[in-house]
Amino acid sequence: MSTFKAPKGTYDLLPPDSAKFLAVREAIAAPLRNSGYGYIETPGFENVELFARGVGESTDIVTKEMYVFETKGGDRLALRPETTAPVLRAVLEANLHKAGNLPVKVWYSGSQYRYERPQKGRYRHFSQVGAEAIGAEDPALDAELIILADQAYRSLGLSNFRILLNSLGDKECRPVYRAALQDFLRGLDLDEDTLRRAEINPLRVLDDKRESVQKQLGDAPLLRDYLCDACKAYHEEVRELITAAGVSFEDDPKLVRGLDYYTRTTFEFVHDGLGSQSAVGGGGRYDGLSEMIGGPALPSVGWALGVDRTVLALEAEGIELELPSTTSVFAVPLSEEARRVLFAKVTELRRNGVAADFSFGVKGLKSAMKSANRSGARYAVIAGERDLAEGVVQLKDMESGEQVAIGVNEIVAELESKLG
Ligand code: HAM
């Protein structure tokens, strides 16, 4: 073992398990690619102000969880705790929104960093696949994203998840609700910190997990009862479109998300087999974020699904993904000359698109065949001095165990035709 360990709250993805993570990322990305979302990649760090303004000065993410550092040049940067604000920053910077083709629909996949208290399903480094649709106010867009996330989870075989849906109102009706909620909270028996929070960000108090707080919130006013007509109509349309698509959801009037940029539609995907860290994904509309970071009005909506928790959800449901073996052919040379000949054949197979691997290092037949087995290859190609003297190699079917001699010059074509 090395002197070093992965930092607290992080873990390494190692083969063969890492293949599951790739498959999950791919399964989430596939429906997005198929629906007009283009791939976007932004840096792993950004100006710290982007998150302070975008995600919200009073959120846990900004006050407690960001990895902030100063560069030698004196810039204050933060490892990204989320990627919505960076994506919008990038779109505005490149003027994609001015190209006349709104919404700008993009998807991303990558690492996020939050200094959280680690526990199962909650890490300091984790991975999301996300989608953002920027610059259109259309309930069909909100519905599209919810339907695509549902499709992604289902394509992985997941079924034990629920979609929680709420509307957080807009800049017309939210302030009225906010004031009513503040009035209510001021009358409760809350500690100083919580009372302060109620003044800065009262909606966040609804999300307080402590029993002592929750039991006082039973009669708290609900945003649902304060939505303006435009927000109500918008939300109703989103609900109808999702329902028509056969996607079931639950109305959750208490759903508030941990980021401040949300307006109107908000949703969370929760999995019932994960214990306390049950949110496998979440998102919503963020109509005001662009203006908050200095851009024009660009109503937008998006989500991010947690790859780590989705893998845990697969395990909780006992789902084994069918991951095709990556290696089709494994070459086992038994002499110096055979090494040269088979290495050339492996190179040729690879150039022709056949996944092939080779027994490296000096190994006996037994241990080389063990490697061939472990590789999951469908065929092994074995050759020793005697084979080459006869101008052949041995082609072994790893499933049936059957072995036949094939001419050295025919082996590549033979394998290609066998593997289709
Ligand atoms: P979020 O709810 O903070 O939203 O994160 C989305 C998902 O990332 C969560 O549902 C969870 O699966 C995963 N996640 C979050 N924190 C952790 C952690 N510490 N360890 C493991 N997984 C975690 C956002 O990040 C928004 N940017 C989503 C969005 C996109 N809204 C609009 N567009």
Image (spheres, rainbow, N blue to C red):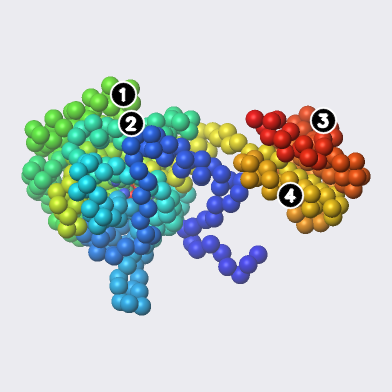
Kind of element beneath mark 1:
loop
Which label's residue is closer to the chain start, 3 or 1? Answer: 1
Q: Say which label, 1 or 2, has the lower sequence index.
A: 2
- Give how far apart the Cα atoms at labels 1 and 2 are: 7 Å
The disc, 4 or 1, on the residue closer to the chain's N-terminal end is 1
Could you tell me the amino acid type at mark 1? Ala
The label nearer to you, 4 versus 1, is 4
Circles 4, 3 touching at the beta carbon (< 8 Å): no
Q: Is residue 86 above or below residue 5?
A: above
Disc 2: which residue: 147
Q: Using the image as rendered, state which of residue 112 and residue 110 is in the foreground.
A: 110
Residue 368, percent from left and from top: 80, 48
Instruction: Name the amino acid type tagged 3.
Output: Glu
Q: Is residue 365 left or right of residue 146?
A: right
Q: Which residue is at 39% across, 55% downward?
A: 112
Q: To which quarter of the image does residue 285 belong? A: top left
Tell me what residue is drawn at x 14 percent, y 49 percent. Answer: 297
Q: Residues within 10 Å of mark 3 (few under 14, many from 20)?
A: few
| Residue 29 rendering spot, x and y as whole percentages | 42, 40
The residue pinned by badge 4 equals 344
Q: Is residue 259 left or right of residue 4?
A: left
Mark 1 touches mark 2? (CB < 8 Å):
yes
Q: Which residue is identified by label 1?
A: 245
Q: Secondary structure at mark 2?
A: helix
Residue type indicated by callout 4: Ala
Q: Quadrant of residue 143?
A: top left
| Vertical comparison of 402 with 38: above or below | above
> Cα distance, mark 2 to mark 4?
49 Å
The residue that mark 3 highlights is 402
Q: Is residue 419 above or below residue 310?
A: above
Q: CA distance from mark 3 to mark 2?
A: 48 Å
x, y percent for residue 56: 22, 56
